[in-house]
Amino acid sequence: MNDPNAKLESPAEVRDALAAQDYLAGDELAVAVFLALELGEPLLLEGEAGVGKTQAAKALAAATGARLIRLQCYEGIDVHSALYDWDYPRQLFALRAAEGGAKEGDLFRREFLLRRPLLEAIESDEPVVLLIDEIDRADDEFEAFLLELLSDFQVTIPELGTLTARRRPAVIVTSNRTRELHDALKRRCLYHWISHPSREREAEIVRAHLPGVADEIALRVCEGVARLRAEDLYKVPGVGETIAWARALGALGTSELEPALGAVLKVREDVQRVLDARLLQGV
């Protein structure tokens, strides 16, 4: 597709557009993305780490030709990191240049404004996919701050007033559910839970990302990942690790799973547990 002015007319078109970016969305996810675009509402994607939430936003931006703007959330993120800040060195320079004649209002003009991801999305004249990634890492105060943006697609900057989106971005909010989000935020979003794919679907995903992969490797890797996910591991592998495992086996020229465990397991205790219990025996 890749036309910023084109419109995805149905869930089937959404699914096909994402598939063209090697993102194989299920029917329910395609419906959720279509509704978010059609209704102009944010879409909250929840699921375990590595199931493809972030990649869905990236694929949507690539499929529609929109600009991807990503806000990566973290503990302690605040308005100045997410929305705007002031260019203090330039303000100080302007103050000195005015030799004391500058008024306070002169220091809070547009030219001194540093736009962060949220403001970039609000003020963009081109189509945007705004990815607010891992909102569950942020604190309650930042989550509350987002309510105005997600409700009315506007933000308030005390020195400049209320700024309304010139063109509503498509908003994807992701959460690994490390904590429960507040109902107020959920009410402002459409919702979809992304589960780990079935073995058959995951094998299709591997083949889409690694066109030359041998069928034996794709199937064995997906069977092995399914076994690992059934265990109580510190870090359960996601789809990205499945692809990395298959790529590693291809590089080694083998379909034996254990030699490349470092591609799929990233915690020493998990690796040792799999080897000691011979969890991959018979795959």
Image (tube, rainbow, N blue to C red):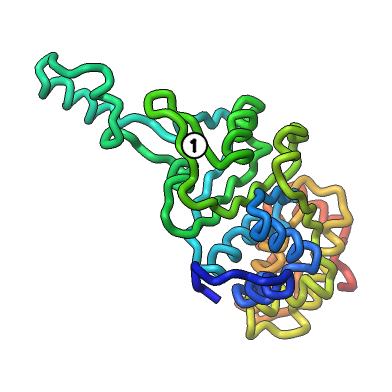
Residue beneath the point at 76% across and 49% down: 191
Residue 59 visible in the picture: yes
Q: Which amino acid does label 1 sit on?
A: Ala
Q: Which residue is drawn at 88% across and 56% down?
A: 230
Residue 108 occupies quadrant = top left
Query: Is residue 97 shown left or right of residue 172?
Result: left
**Is 142 in front, or is 42?**
42
CA neighbours of label 1 inside 10 A, class few (<14), some (14 to 19), many (20+): many
Instruction: Give the camera-side residue of 214 and 3.
Output: 3
Residue at left 73%, top 74%? 12
Q: Where is residue 5 in the image (x, y as percent from the top left)?
A: 50, 68
The spot of residue 158 in percent (x, y) is 43, 24
Q: In this view, does 46 lie above or below 139?
A: below
**Image quadrant for the C terminus?**
bottom right
Residue 249 shows in this picture: no
- Residue 250 locus on image (x, y percent): 64, 78
Instruction: Look at mark 1 in the image and give the residue it sits on.
Output: 82
